Image (cartoon, rainbow, N blue to C red):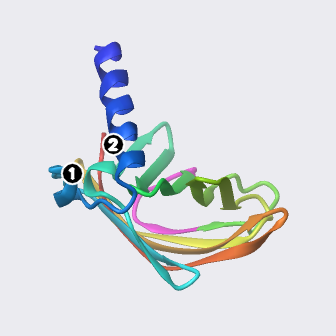
Amino acid sequence: MKTLKNLILFAFVAVLFSCSDATDADLGLSGQGSLSAKVDGATFTSLSVAVGATVTNGVAAIQGSNSAGEYIRINIMSYNGVGTYSTGNAINNISSISYGTVNPIATWISTFNIGTGTIQITEDTATTIKGTFSFTGVNDGSPNKVVTEGTFSAPKN
């Protein structure tokens, strides 16, 4: 089963890189999730099949990516369900929000006392987690990325 999952993941990644501006419809895919935001004013929209969430052992992890190899990841430590969570506000706060690209490989992050971010969880059911987010991500050597108007509705794995 693990081999099958790895093959599916490899095929999905290969499709992503060969169709840099592809949408779910272009790829013949359908999914249940959504994750979108403005990154420095430009629209980021994840493929619906590439959105997912996991909540386990007091940690929530939410992620989405698009066919251009961009992704947004949210990790909330000490997760307690619906509420507001911050990133980048304290050296002992390991919750994080990141925006990254695979070409070139780069990540902008808000965590510990780096950058600033807010995550608002508005709904958490047995099957879905929904909310909003915004953050300023830091990457040494690059200008900060300002991510606004973030929203997600992620199926739980």
Mark with earlier residue (2, 1): 2
Query: Would you place residue 148 above or below residue 126 in this image?
Result: below
Query: Would you place residue 148 above or below residue 34 in this image?
Result: below
Residue 78 is one of the magenta-drawn residues:
yes
Q: In this view, does 58 lie to the left or right of 124?
A: right
Closest to the observer: 155 or 137?
137
Which residue type does callout 2 highlight?
Answer: Val
Query: Would you place residue 45 above or below residue 27 in this image?
Result: below
**10 Å neighbourhood of mark 1: few (<14), some, or many (≥20)?**
some
Closest to the observer: 39 or 63?
39
Give coordinates of residue 61: x percent, y percent. Answer: 47, 48
Give coordinates of residue 96: x percent, y percent. Answer: 63, 57
Secondary element at image label 1:
helix
Task: Find disc 2 in the rendering and name its residue.
Answer: 15
| Residue beneath the point at 62% across and 68% down | 86
Residue farthest to the bottom, as pictured = 41
Q: Which residues lie in the magenta part?
A: 77-85
Q: In this view, does 58 lie to the left or right of 116?
A: left
- Whether label 2 touches label 1, CB < 8 Å: yes
Q: Which mark is residue 132?
A: none
| Residue beneath the point at 78% across and 65% down | 114
Closest to the observer: 151 or 105?
105
Secondary element at image label 2:
helix
Q: Could you tell me how many numbered marks the image carries?
A: 2
Task: Find disc 1 in the rendering and name its residue.
Answer: 27
